Every structure is written in structure tokens, then in C-alpha cells.
Image (cartoon, helix red, strand yellow):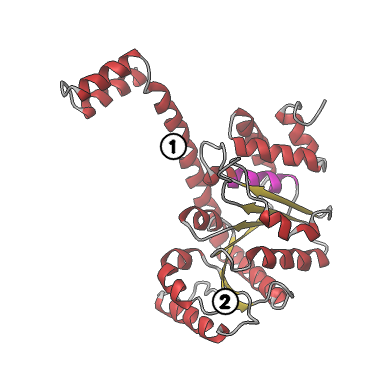
Amino acid sequence: MSRRQLPAPELFQAAVNGDRSALARLLSLIERGDDDARTIGRLAYPLSGSGYTVGLTGAPGAGKSTLTSSLIGHLRAQDLEIAVLAIDPSSPFTGGAILGDRVRMQDHATDPGVFIRSMATRGHLGGLSLATPEAVRVLDAIGRKWILVETVGVGQVEVEVAGKADTTIVVVNPGWGDSVQANKAGLMEIADVFVINKADRKGVEETSRDLMQMLDLSDLPHDTWRPPIIPTTGTTGQGVPELWDAVLAHREYAESSGDLRERRAFRLREELREIVATRLGRRARQICSGERWDQLTDAVVERSTDPWTAADEMLAAVDA
């Protein structure tokens, strides 16, 4: 029987046993977001909780994929196994993930200690906000201790996804100070580590100074984590060991302070809320059809009743 024909529980067990093609199929089912995705989520949850997620976000062209590739090399040199989720925009033609990130990381594609997957918003009823944590949970459940989540931009969705990591790296380039000022509200809220990538260019000191001023103005309490600023050059790997040291330092702080537990609890509550909202949304689409729905909408259009009264009647039928 082919992987496409295997039921979700058998696919999941095969992935736990190390079958990479089964894992790829599981993630495809998660992206689709139907009943199989819920089955996979139920199987993965009890086995998850020991993996650590590092998010990377920043403007397009900041060099995140090259930096991620260098990070993978650094971690593999320490014999650490890694999974990478590259969160891509959906192709306007196929709805699939654009594979540029995997192309840039192709040096690691044949390494059994590295699993790289591009994900898009296609199909999943809850979008990336639900598909991403479910995919991370599966990678955690099969035993990947380090999971990197790279997003392609600093739009609302991308920042939201990256900000749900245990440690979030915000990547900027030299001379990006004005843009940082313009975007600091979203970035400052999620950044645990700032990276000035392409540090072989001019303007590193000025950008570092801008970031430090932003941190000074953010009124961070003295006893909380202050994001370090790490210059790197992704193409050469310069600064990558220091970047990883900063990630480890943040993990140590988050674990010892209780911040990690609080973050994960908050994320689970938000995920539960989104699951409920998504399923209610699906139910709402189902009830907003049929003969009675048509009658009520006609009554609203004809102004013989108001939208709130019509909605109350539809909802009363659901509650009955």
C-alpha cells in the first residue's frame, strides 16, 4: 500500500519509526486541515513537549534562508538533529508553497539529520495559525529536539507565526534603522534576539545603535530578558556560533524564570480558542444556507425585519 493510501494512524507510527516519506505525508494532511489532521493532532499531542522551537522572521531579502542554512550547519557539527519549517507565501497559480527556501537550503537536503519542509496557507481552515503549531507538534512528537520556523516576511501573519516560537530571532540588515522604527511595535513584541545579518556591509554600528535605542525606550523591566544584538554574515557563517549561544542563553533564562512555561500555556490557550472559532465558523457557514436562510435574508433585504432579529432566529434553531 502506498503512503497516500495508508490511514493517518499508520502513517504517524511510520513517521515515529523514522520514515521520512510518511512524515512528509503527515505534514501534507496537516496543511489540508480535514479530519485526518485532527486525528494526527490527537496522536501527536501526548508525545510532544520536549522539542524547542526557534522562529526567524524579518523583511524579505534580509538573508534569513542563508542564515538558517548556516545555523543548520552549525547545529549538525554538534550532531544535533533539526527540522525546518519554511513558511512561504502561497503560489498564485497552484496554491502551493514557493520552494525558494528549500532551494537555498539544498546543501542539507540529503542529510538524514535534517528535515526541511515548506508550508503554505493552502487548504487549512485555520490557515497558518493552526497548521504551523500542528506541524511543529508532529515534528516534536517524532523526536526532533530543535525545530526552526522561518517566515518570509514581517506581515501580520508571519510575525504572528514566528512570535509563537519558544525563542524568536528578528533579522534585519545594516541601514534598516528607519524601517525598524516604522515596524518596531510588532517586532519589539516578539524579538528575543536581534540579528544584523549581512554584517560585512556598511552601517552595522548605526543599526545596532538604533536597535539599542529602541530597547532603551521599550521600558523593559530590569529583571527581564533584554534581547541581545548579534551581527552575522549568513553566507560565511560569521557570527552564527554567537547567535546560537544567544539562543541557548535565552532558553536557559526562559526555563529558569518560568517564562517558557507561561509562553507555552498562553500559546495552547490561543490555539484552543482558534480551533473553537474555526469550527464555529464552519458551523456558521453550514447553517447560513437552506430555505429558512433564504427566507430570512429576503426579509432583511425587504426591510421587514432587521439583521439582528434574523440572526437570533437562525441561532435559536441551532441552540434548540
Amino acid at circle 1: Ala
Q: Nearer the viewer, residue 308 or 206?
A: 206
Contact between marks 2 and 1 (CB within 8 A): the answer is no
Q: Residue furthest toward the left?
A: 304
Residue identifier under label 1: 277
Residue 271 percent coordinates (x, y): 51, 44
Residue 78 showing in the rendered view:
no
The kind of residue on which mark 2 rests is: Pro
Q: Residue at 73% x, 26% y: name it.
A: 7
The verdict on residue 128 being magenta is no
Q: What SS does tag 2 mark?
A: loop
Report the magenta stretch's main SS.
helix
The answer to whether 49 appears left or right of 122 in the picture is right
Q: Which residue is drawn at the image coordinates 21% and 24% (left, top)?
A: 300
Q: Which image quarter holds the C terminus? A: top left
Residue 119 image point, x, y percent: 63, 47
Q: Which residue is mark 2?
A: 228
Total number of numbered discs in the rendering: 2
**Within 10 Å of the Cα at label 2, are there few (<14), some (14-19), or many (20+) other Cα atoms?**
some
Q: Is residue 138 magenta?
A: yes
Name the quadrant containing residue 285: top left
Let me know if residue 130 appears in the view.
yes
**In the image, which residues are magenta?**
132-142
For the residues marked 2 and 1, what is the alpha-carbon distance in whole angstroms?
37 Å
**First reached walking from the N terminus: tag 2 or tag 1:** 2
Percent position of residue 164, x then y? 54, 55
Q: Does residue 304 sit above or below 249 in this rendering?
A: above
- Above or below, comparing residue 110 to residue 66 in the picture: above
